[in-house]
């Protein structure tokens, strides 16, 4: 009898693609959270308890809704993949710190229940869930923002303490720039003078507007790790800058102001809601920048980042169709 041991092997054949990557969904989401965390922590440090409450309830709404949905449907829990955490954190970053807790909670619930789970869960949603939650809040409770004391967190609060006022409110720099443009420069608003504040410590508007420098740093980390395609943020920000320059506006100011940096690096780059091909992403990014810039210049509101990205999310499937890559082995014709 032979001493050799017969080895039985089973051949398994799966459908393509056969190229594997060590970057799993939880790992990718972990990198996104890590890249966003410095800007988020800096915002919390400077804005204090109101900002912490906003982040907590946005996260609770997002993560809690996904857990309840899966439990009710008797499906495996998916909160471990990190997508709900990213959605809740990004939603919170689009909100001012004085957002009522129940609005932040409702935004998180809508983002997951309607924009994600109703579409079939992760990988099936047409629109970015965090921005969907932001749009839902903006459309449903815009009046609440107008009536909420100190909806932003303004540096002039120090003046309120000195002068004895109960509250101080005012327009953001982006709104002031729009008013100055409408008045043909009558207010003398200096856009270039706002650069340093927008880069390092802007205490007006949303949590995601506190430090542009930290958002840029986080975005560059994601690009360096290969998690984000550089074409989208570059195309988005570049288009925005060019349009504003042609319109006679300060391009640097408009790239730094509002939610453009947060949107360009962390939301427009969403794998599910952006095109799959390289040229498709270029067209998508140019569309985001163009829509955003035109909205700021001619729209009734000073900021259009949410709706610019949403508009292009809806066009992403059509863009993919227009840029279908050549089939492997395809030949144009004989001769």
Image (spheres, rainbow, N blue to C red):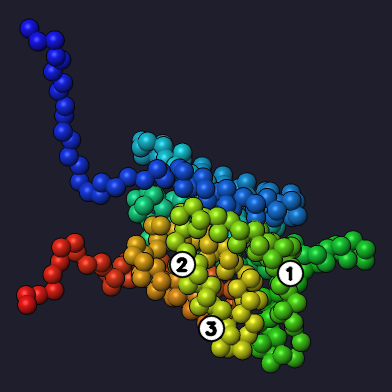
Distance between the alpha carbons at the discs numbered 2 and 1: 25 Å
Q: Is residue 105 left or right of residue 12?
A: right
Q: Are marks 2 and 1 in contact (CB under 8 Å)?
A: no
The residue pinned by badge 1 equals: 196
Q: Which residue is mark 2?
A: 232
Residue drawn at 46 percent across, 43 percent down: 27
Assess disc 2: are there few (<14), some (14-19) or many (≥20) residues with their C-alpha within 10 Å of its C-alpha: many
Which is nearer the N-term, disc 1 or disc 3? 1
Q: Secondary structure at mark 3?
A: helix
Judged left or right of residue 95, residue 67 is: left
List x then y, in percent, for residue 315.
36, 70
Q: Is residue 197 above or below residue 43?
A: below
* Disc nearer the start of the sequence (2/1): 1
Is residue 93 at all visible to an observer of this figure?
yes
Res 114 visible: no
Judging by the rendered image, the residue that carries numbered circle 3 is 243
The N terminus lies in quadrant: top left
Label 1, label 3: how far apart the Cα atoms are: 22 Å
């Amino acid at each position: 009898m032979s001493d050799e041991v017969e080895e039985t092997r089973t051949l398994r054949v799966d459908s393509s693609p056969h190229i594997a990557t060590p970057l799993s969904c939880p790992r990718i989401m972990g990198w996104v959270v890590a890249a966003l965390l410095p800007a988020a922590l800096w915002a919390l440090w400077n804005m204090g308890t109101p900002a912490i409450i906003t982040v907590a309830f946005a996260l609770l709404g997002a993560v809690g809704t996904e857990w309840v949905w899966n439990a009710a449907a008797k499906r495996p829990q998916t909160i471990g993949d990190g997508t709900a955490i990213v959605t809740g954190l990004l939603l919170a970053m689009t909100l001012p710190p004085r957002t009522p807790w129940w609005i932040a909670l409702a935004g998180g619930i809508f983002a997951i229940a309607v924009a994600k789970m109703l579409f079939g869960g992760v990988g099936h949603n047409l629109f970015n869930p965090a921005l969907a939650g932001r749009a839902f809040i903006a459309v449903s409770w815009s009046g609440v923002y107008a009536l909420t004391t100190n909806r932003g967190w303004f540096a002039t609060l120090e003046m309120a303490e000195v002068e004895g006022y109960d509250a101080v409110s005012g327009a953001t720099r982006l709104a002031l720039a729009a008013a100055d443009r409408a008045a043909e420069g009558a207010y003398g608003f200096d856009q270039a003078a706002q650069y340093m504040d927008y880069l390092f410590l802007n205490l007006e508007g949303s949590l995601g507007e506190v430090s542009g420098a930290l958002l840029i740093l986080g975005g560059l980390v994601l690009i360096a790790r290969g998690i984000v395609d550089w074409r989208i943020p570059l195309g988005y920000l570049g288009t925005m800058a060019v349009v504003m320059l042609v319109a006679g506006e300060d391009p640097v100011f408009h790239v730094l102001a509002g939610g453009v940096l947060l949107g360009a690096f962390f939301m427009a780059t969403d794998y599910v809601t952006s095109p799959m091909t390289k040229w498709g992403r270029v067209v998508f990014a140019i569309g985001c920048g163009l829509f955003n810039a035109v909205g700021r210049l001619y729209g009734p509101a000073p900021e259009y980042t949410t709706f610019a990205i949403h508009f292009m999310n809806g066009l992403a499937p059509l863009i993919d169709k227009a840029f279908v890559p050549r089939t492997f082995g395809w030949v144009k014709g004989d001769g």
